[in-house]
Amino acid sequence: MYPDRVVKLLTKGFAVLKQRIITALVLLALFMGVLFLLPMQWFSLIFVAVILLAGWEWANLSNLNRALRFVFLAALGLTLMVTAQYVFSMNFNDPDIDRGRQILAVACGWWALAFLWVQSYPSSAALWGNRWVRGLIGLVVLVPTWLSLVVLRGLDHGAWLVLYVVAIVAAADVGAYFVGRKFGKRKLAREVSPGKSWEGFFGGLGACLILALVTSYLFELPLKNTVLFTFGVLVTALASVIGDLVESMFKRHRGIKDSSHMLPGHGGILDRIDSLSAALPVFTMAALASELPKYL
């Protein structure tokens, strides 16, 4: 019996791994195709659809019933339309950068507040536990995610900049995993994500610091821009951790493991973009401040 159980567990484990790999490869191919091949108008509209799907999952995190989820989707769609008109005048090739900065600054301020809520969870739930408050937070999270993605993609070499944000998130994750596994002792957010440690967090920052310095060297950024860019990368890495923790906090409060089962082996869309939802607005602000595209 015992060997049979081991065989069954191994078979199930390999099946799940195979499913995760296949899904990841399909998502990667679709993402790269949309990022590098489609014109801005189509790129922007496709990611409107992605954000709306993520909005459906956020409505679930907010504990809204099925009818109210459609109300939330309508509110999210309307907010996206208003944002598109305000920043782009519906021409996604020509954004008003100053107006975009205003919205992204609000988003960056929200993520700073969210980190305090994560650290004080579960007592902080008294401030945001109401389902309508959680729904409003969803708008503050998802709309700037879309806006920063479109603004960043529209800059010179924008597709590569978007890919660089993904690289920052990956570096933070990899650095945190290996350093945390080896040295992790002090819990980063015990009540939200017990597996994360402060040691892992600083390991992730260290990996991103190396990434930023190598990038600055390769593209010969002036010292002032190197400092601004490196600071931006580190803050982006910090934001990516906060984004991950915030979604974990909402899922824990809701009593669910994944935001949905939309992506086989990977949970939902929010489970894939939680770190990016915080990292993208921060990095976009940093890229604009350091004038990085000018040196690529």
Image (tube, grey):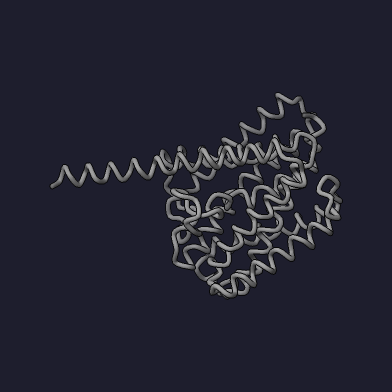
- The residue drawn where x is 69% and y is 36% is 36
In the visual, does 277 lie left or right of 22?
A: right
Counting from the top left corner in percent of width and height, residue 203 is at: 52, 39
Relative vertical location of residue 66 with respect to residue 140 in this rendering, above or below: below
Relative vertical location of residue 251 with respect to residue 207 in this rendering, above or below: below
- In the picture, which quadrant includes the C terminus? top right
Please count the marks in the image.
Answer: 0
Residue closest to the eye, 260 or 275: 260
Residue closest to the eye, 163 or 29: 29
Counting from the top left corner in percent of width and height, residue 107 is at: 71, 57
In the visual, does 214 lie left or right of 24?
A: right
Counting from the top left corner in percent of width and height, residue 262 is at: 50, 55
- The residue drawn where x is 43% and y is 51% is 195
User: Which residue extends farthest left?
Assistant: 1
Relative vertical location of residue 81 with respect to residue 101 in this rendering, above or below: below
- The residue drawn where x is 48% and y is 59% is 192
Q: Quadrant of residue 67?
A: bottom right
In the visual, does 130 lie left or right of 233?
A: left
Counting from the top left corner in percent of width and height, residue 126 is at: 56, 74
- The residue drawn where x is 74% and y is 64% is 79
In the visual, does 235 lie left or right of 150?
A: left
Q: Quadrant of residue 17?
A: top left
